[in-house]
Image: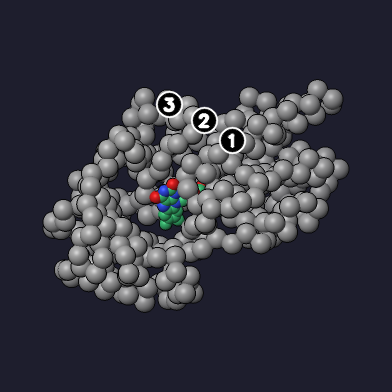
């Protein structure tokens, strides 16, 4: 069997690994201490926060089929929140999400789907891939401390495009396209409170503020009861302040949220900010994944299509369809 290295254990890396595991020896390398990437959940005592992806849609047949076992076991559930649009202190619209346009979440945290997917895979955590070098047997991966991470017939990157462009060898024919693809940042403010706030909604889109989204995180299915709020800054404000000291960002977003909610939230028991440097990307018109048969290198991820969970699945799934026959052909020839 051919050896395939996948860099990144977010949804796209995990989906790709699942699709290839029957025809290749797949190793996943993940720089952080857990799987899931931007489908992330933070635990702080009894408070839990989905500080990256909030929910996802399931629009394609392929994604629905892939999720079927997880929907069946309730590892993925519908989140029927009361949703509001807020504009300068006023609620301009309100409705309940329901089955007509279902919003899904992983249960009990957004990272749980990734944890389920990773269960039977070879995932090396806390292992950032820093270098990819050619040797006589294929591509040799090296860690930040120059430790060898093995040699592979194929290497697939699922990391953000700017990082992939730096990491993948220059013979990869799509390096230029990757380096031109720009993702934007987003700050997530997380608040844990012993005394719940009384809002008539659990999810809100905010207009004309530096915050664009607020969710009552523990209202999602299967969460603990401890009151937790997640607020996302707009991409515009986040990009303009992407290098700012995290404490200053926290104070600004806390003031902004206090104004939106009409109450002082600076006294929350837990208050933390996470900086997502590569959070989101607008809809793209290019290929849904990048494959270079000549160099045996490839790249995929949500950023090929749009900054959405389903886009991460679709990009990885399409790459697996193209890659499988190549891996199998090479196996038969060798
Ligand atoms: C704040 C925020 C809100 C969002 N809200 C929504 C939403 O409501 N609905 C929705 O559908 N989508 C949302 N998204 C987008 C969604 O999270 C992504 O589309 C999806 O999770 C992308 O998956 P991925 O596998 O392509 O990338 P990622 O999840 O980014 O995975 C890439 C992985 O590569 C790892 N990595 C990076 N460099 C290296 C390296 N050198 N070596 C090893 N590993 C490396 C990273 O640690 C990461 O785990 C949101 C994202 C953010 C940040």
Alpha carbon of mark 3 to alpha carbon of mark 1: how far? 15 Å
The one of 137 and 267 positioned closer to us in this rendering: 267
Graded by Cα atoms within 10 Å as few (under 14), some (14 to 19) or many (20 or more), the crowding at tag 1 reads many
* Residue 272, numbered circle: none
- For disc 1, the marked residue is 317
Where is residue 280 shown, x and y percent of the image? 49, 57
Location of residue 301 with respect to 322 vertically, above or below: below
**Which circle's residue, 3 or 2, is located before the other in the chain?**
2
Query: In screen coordinates, is 153 left or right of 249?
Result: right
Where is residue 257 shown, x and y percent of the image? 26, 68
**Rendering quarter of residue 180:** bottom right
Q: Is mark 1 within 8 Å of ligand 1?
A: no
Where is residue 212 shown, x and y percent of the image? 34, 62
Quadrant where the C terminus lies? top right
Query: Does the CB distance between marks 1 and 2 fall below 8 Å?
Result: yes
Graded by Cα atoms within 10 Å as few (under 14), some (14 to 19) or many (20 or more), the crowding at tag 2 reads few
Number of dots carrying numbers: 3
- For disc 2, the marked residue is 62
- For disc 3, the marked residue is 68
Label 2's element? helix
Q: Residue at x 42, y 25 (%)?
A: 69
Q: Is mark 3 within 8 Å of ligand 1?
A: no
Label 1's element? helix
Graded by Cα atoms within 10 Å as few (under 14), some (14 to 19) or many (20 or more), the crowding at tag 3 reads few
Quadrant where the N terminus lies? top right
Q: Residue at x 23, y 47 (%)?
A: 95
Location of residue 64 with respect to 157 vertically, above or below: above
């Amino acid at each position: 069997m051919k050896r395939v290295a996948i860099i990144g254990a977010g949804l796209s890396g995990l989906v790709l690994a699942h699709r290839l595991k029957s025809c290749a020896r797949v190793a996943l390398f993940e720089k952080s201490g857990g799987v899931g990437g931007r489908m992330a959940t933070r635990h702080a005592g009894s408070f839990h926060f989905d500080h990256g992806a909030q929910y996802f849609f399931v629009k394609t047949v392929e994604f629905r089929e892939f999720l079927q076992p997880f929907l069946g076991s309730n590892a993925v559930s519908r989140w029927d929140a009361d949703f509001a649009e807020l504009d300068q202190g006023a609620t301009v619209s309100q409705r309940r999400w329901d089955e007509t346009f279902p919003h899904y979440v992983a249960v009990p945290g957004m990272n749980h789907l990734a944890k389920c997917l990773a269960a039977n895979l070879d995932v090396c955590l806390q292992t950032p891939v820093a270098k990819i070098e050619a040797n006589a047997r294929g591509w040799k991966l090296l860690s930040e401390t120059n430790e060898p991470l093995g040699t592979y017939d194929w290497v697939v990157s699922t990391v953000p495009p700017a990082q992939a462009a730096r990491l993948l060898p220059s013979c990869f024919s799509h390096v230029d396209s990757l380096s031109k693809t720009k993702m934007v940042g987003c700050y997530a403010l997380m608040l844990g409170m012993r005394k719940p706030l009384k809002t008539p909604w659990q999810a809100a889109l905010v207009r004309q503020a530096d915050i664009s989204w607020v969710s009552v995180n523990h209202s999602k299915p299967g969460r603990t009861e401890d009151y937790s709020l997640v607020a996302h800054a707009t991409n515009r404000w986040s990009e303009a302040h992407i290098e700012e000291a995290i404490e200053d960002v926290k104070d600004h977003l806390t003031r902004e949220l206090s104004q939106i909610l009409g109450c002082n939230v600076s006294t929350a028991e837990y208050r933390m900010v996470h900086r997502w440097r590569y959070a989101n990307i607008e809809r793209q018109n290019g290929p849904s994944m990048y494959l270079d048969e000549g160099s045996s290198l490839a790249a995929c991820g949500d950023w090929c299509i749009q900054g959405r969970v389903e886009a991460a699945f679709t990009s990885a799934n399409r790459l697996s369809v193209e890659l499988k026959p190549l891996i199998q052909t090479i196996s038969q020839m060798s």
